[in-house]
Amino acid sequence: MKYGYGVDLGGTTVKMGLFTGEGQLLDKWEIDTDTSAGGRNIPSDIGRSILADMKKHSFAAEDYLGVGIGVPGQVWPDGTADAVNLGWRKLPLISELEAVTGLRAVGDNDANTAAMGEYWQGGGKGYKSLVLVTLGTGVGGGIIIDGKCLQGAHRAGGEIGHIPVDPTETRICGCGNRGCLEQYASATGCARIAVETLSATDAPSTLRSSRKVDARAVWDAVKAGDKVALEIADKFCDYLGQGLAIVANTVDPDVLVIGGGVSRAGQVLIDITAEKYRVHAFNACKDTPIVLAALGNDAGMYGCVANLL
């Protein structure tokens, strides 16, 4: 039996797990992310936490596959990492993890590791290729083709949230462009569409009495049959379906996997999105299945271990 550590590095906490090489999660825990001193202490904090866990087990050194890590930024071929929110610029992440733990280390962007996790043990298990789209505050994603993550020449492969879907948009996206998918198909985008739709009609809606008109409130109202909420969902899913079609027409994956906080809406989100997707997709790709992600917040850890195999 082989064992590996998966590390999902976030801006507030670091999620860590010990897995078997077959994908069984044996143990998981979290530590705080120390962003002081430009995040310089993070690699050693992670390494020491892993060493403490290793002492709890009687595994031989050769039984370990190593440490896989996903970061909110880029990990370059030389093992250095950039992560603006952590203060990292060419931080020697991989060499420092290896020095502290004595284990082999590999790293990748956190969206890519989530995609790899869903491919290995989640919604994409059993398929050869997938596109993962995560709908949270923004829109993230990852593309797995024949078991390998599409990185791209500039480590920008899978930046699905910044596919342009509306050339008439005047508001600026966080990336500096306009009309990006993230501006519409994120939780933030859903709330904005809701506010705009409610202000444009006098039709009754339970959303008008909601304490906070956010994505969760919208999808709860959709499930209750609220007509205005259904109109909001229709607009939201049309943008999402358009973005998915653009990606599918480009890489033609076996399956499209939807994750992130908005995906908690469940099957109703998938059903409406699939309908819209078929309108926009190239004929050969129209029947590509769209499914919910299965691993939740653990997907990144799973993917980090998959990268060790």
Image (spheres, helix red, strand yellow):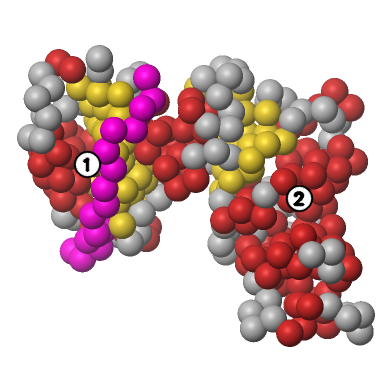
Q: Is residue 35 magenta?
A: yes
Foreground residue among 199 and 140: 199
Q: Identity of the amino acid at label 2?
A: Val
Can residue 233 be seen in the rendering of this structure? yes
Task: Give me the disc on residue 268.
Answer: 2
Query: Badge 2: few (under 14), some or many (20 or more) residues near its Cα, within 10 Å?
Result: some
What residue lies at 63% left-to-right and 51% top-to-bottom? 263
Foreground residue among 204 and 309: 204
Seen as rendered, the residue at the extreme front is 224
Q: Identity of the amino acid at label 1?
A: Pro
What residue lies at 13% left-to-right and 22% top-to-bottom? 59
What residue lies at 84% left-to-right and 64% top-to-bottom? 225
Residue located beneath label 1 in the image? 92
Task: Give me the disc on residue 81.
Answer: none
Q: Which residues are magenta?
A: 22-37
Between the residue at mark 2 and the residue at mark 1, the CA separation in whole angstroms equals: 44 Å
Q: Quadrant of the N terminus?
A: top left
Q: Position of residue 281 (x, y in %)?
A: 84, 35
Can residue 173 be seen in the rendering of this structure? no
What residue lies at 24% left-to-right and 59% top-to-bottom? 32
Q: Is residue 291 magenta?
A: no
Q: Quadrant of the C terminus?
A: top left
Relative to 123, 164 lies left or right: right
Foreground residue among 159 and 44: 44
Relative to 162, 54 lies left or right: left
Mark count = 2
